[in-house]
Amino acid sequence: MASAALPGRRRILARPTAKTGVWGWMTTVDHKKIGIMYGVTAFIFFILGGLEALAIRTQLAVPDGETLSAEVYNQFFTMHGITMIFLVVMPMGVALMNYFIPLMIGARDVAFPRLNAFSYWVFLLGGLFLYSSFFLGGAPDGGWFGYAPLSTELPGNGMTFYSLGLQMLGVASLAGAVNFIITIINMRAPGMTFMRLPVFIWMSLVTSFLLLFAMPIIAVALFELMFDRVYEANFFNPAAGGDPLLWQNLFWLFGHPEVYIMILPAMGIISEVLPTFARKPIFGYAAIVFAGIAIGFMGWGVWAHHMFTSGLGPVANTAFALSTMFIAVPTGIKIFNWIGTLWGGAIRFTTPLLFSIGFVAMFVIGGLSGVTHAIVPHDAQQHDTYYVVAHFHYVLFGGAIFGLFAGTYYWWPKIFGRLLGERLGKAHFWLMLIGFNLAFGPMHVFGLQGMPRRIYKYPSGMGWDFWNLMSTVGAFIIALSFVVFLVNVVLSRRRGEIAGADPWDARTLEWSMPSPPPEYNFAEVPIVKHRDDWWYTKYTETPEGTPTPVHAGGADVDDDDDGHEAQHIHLPDPSYFPLVAALGLPVAAYGVIYENEIVIGAGLLVALLGLFGWTLEPSAEDGH
Amino acid sequence: MTHSEGTGDAVHEAHDHHPAPRTYVKIAIILAIVTAIEVAFSYIPDADPGLIVTGLVVMAFVKFALVALYFMHLRFDNRLFRRLFVTGIILSLIVFAVYLAMLFGRGGAAPLVTGS
Amino acid sequence: MATSEAPAVPAHEEHYTSTGLDNVKMAMWAFLGSECLFFGSLISTYLLYRNRVLDGPTPADIYDIPYTSVSSFVLLMSSLTMVLALAGIQRRDMRACRIWLLATAMLGMIFIGGQIYEFTAFVEEGLKISTSTFGSSFFVMTGFHGAHVTVGIFMLLALFGMSLFGRLDSDDGPRKVELIGLYWHFVDIVWIVIFTVVYLVPTN
């Protein structure tokens, strides 16, 4: 083998071997460990974003609030948005995609395990970089949407942190998207045709394509912002003819696909949960899949509905109003199919099912307010008011977050081997549902009554006082519900019910493995013969259509008895180079902030060295 | 040199129709000629700008296609690769055409512009 | 295994793919598709701003078409040398592959040299990134293109080095050259678009 010719280099580049401990986690390329890291990190950021929200709501609980100054308020609402979108909802979706895509398609790992690790480290470092800004002169304060020329002209380093931090997160997302696309297209087990894929996999594929094509656009916008702030460019400089609409167009060209990136994984999750707890296949599989694909395409045609009041003119406004109304159609198809899945099913009201039903209900409310935005004159009234805040929290919290919690409760036993408690889970659900509706429902009303967004205080006598206070109470109830969830997590780790392979009597391949799955996932690569193949291993149908257990089916669970065969399974080796390459990026970014070319160069050099090591390291000690 | 057929790996022959180096050189010559025509075209005095732009865009497209189809082997490879690439191209064209149309076609709110 | 169906997974399960296509090649094409949006955003920013020159030279004032035509020609020819390098390694002529790889890298370096010269000339003539929206969009767009070419040159030189150490001799060698070649041709294609749309299209 060529690599044996240079034993000296091979020693330096030898792959790490640790599988446990801190070093094991830092060098892992195992999709399951990476998924867990994404999930834990996302939950920690959820706490931070939630604290920011509580601070905001405390400030707005009463008129002329004095909890936060305007300057601090601006940082908090900006970071709340950035955190929830980029550091919570997106990575939480990626956590579940990472863990379950290979399991559900019958693969041993993703297509590019080291790239997967790189994505995680860049995400973590990007998030830490963003949060370090609080201690280095102030966090970004121009809103998560960073409209220029405000964002180019705000003093201090905050918005420069914004431009660089989001850029890093974008790199992580793009790498992840490429990974998942190739994994889903190219690493399906034999017999796993596209139309046998679980809906979650389809939604992950569409999400990944959206990421692939949307991230480069925000990357350009952020580079232009960075060049304006640090290198005196004129992209958004009004005195030089810089155009605010350039920012808005580039941002929303990314931003609208971005909201589908956030919601489609959650839609995929509930498309798995509902059939399991209704003991019926998903209603209208093909329609749901094609509706998801349609959303992916049509999502590119609606972006200017965020810009109806920016002076585009009647032709543009009309065109985008129509496209926005049309995109409600595929979404509506999915809603009907989810209801159809439950209809006539033998329903078990477990926590994941409750969160899924909550998703459907809350998302419909959010979707309806969204449709009202599609009507341009209405939008002129609603734009920049709390009505919009209500809308997007209903779809992103009531929708995406509820869906992600459904996935968390559903898949927790598979990942950790123990179930989360049902009583605490239900308490979490009901508290969160009540708190959420109390926090965001009234916003529809006082938004239409004229309360603007992004104000750090409001005067008394506007008629907004009472419902703002109620909204704050709701926010604290949400916080309480999250504490209940954390208690559930801690108790489950210690004395949760042992799950076994298939605690829910579910339908898809991941439930055919032990909980948690062994490192190699499957002892033998499965041969897939149906959609919901695991279900058909366990059950056939009587002529009336009721499932009856297959004799000795389900005993096919891949047990650890196959351990001796597992030794012949070759898994990708751990590596430290993804982490090394990732470390270069925040170093270079700090160099830009402090306008120090040497540090920028050092960062790029570290990244380059990481990439060299990555390409040159041996693939396995046995020279495979 | 195409004498490798006899010695080469049968598996490779089965998948790939690789154009001979001579074909690549021919394509490169076409590219060079088209570039020369493009440059000359751009200098035509007093011509209708619309015509010039159309001609230039067509010629650029021809060059683009030749490099993609032959040098990047898309003509002979699995269609999936072409689809991945073309999706990006078409999305890019549509989306940026629409937004430029929006920005240049704005009613009354456009910022300062000087041709100077 | 006592199953009656013949398993469809071949003996070397690690190399099994659903489509029979190479993962990395597919990833490269997906990445290039994404790069279309990246350069599309930069080019459309330029198209928005090329006539907004409130200060400093305009495109018509400053572009040197004959000069840029020559450097465009150089980059076009580098695509030829790239594909000849690939043809070389595909017929196991490692020496030809090496020569053409080096030629490609050198043509790339000539192109970059030309870009650097052009940039410094423009700065001397009064066009900087800070001069106008035209200046900003021109330099950032062509700068990112140049950065992509530079990365490509590094990869070509790395391939050249690998071939010297015999690391392209395996069955995998042509694939590596092909992948870098795809990236390089893409960078050339972007320049085909930039040259036409930025330099040649009349600004009126």
Image: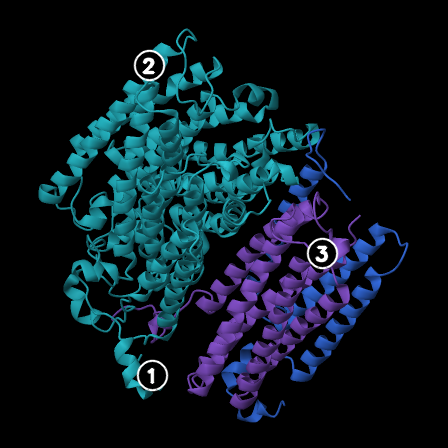
Chain colours: A cyan, B blue, C purple
Q: Where is residue A234 in the image (x, y as percent from the top left)?
A: 60, 44
Which quarter of the rendering shows the N terminus of chain A? bottom left
Q: Is residue B46 visible?
A: yes
Circle 3 packing at 10 Å, graded few (<14), some (14-19), many (20+), is: many
The residue identified by callout 1 is: A3
Residue A305: quadrant of the picture: top right
**Same chain for the residues under marks 1 and 2 in the image:** yes
Q: Where is residue C187 in the image (x, y as percent from the top left)?
A: 59, 65
Left or right side of B39 for A6: left
Mark 3 lies on a secondary structure that is helix
Q: Where is residue B97 in the image (x, y as percent from the top left)?
A: 67, 45
Q: Are marks 3 and 2 in contact (CB under 8 Å)?
A: no
Mark 2 lies on a secondary structure that is loop
Above or below for C144 versus A454:
below
Q: What residue type is labelled 3?
A: Val
Judging from the image, mark 3 belongs to the subunit labelled C
Tell me which residue sits at (49%, 73%) in the image. Answer: C155
**Front-most of A375 and C22?**
A375
Circle 2 packing at 10 Å, graded few (<14), some (14-19), many (20+), is: many
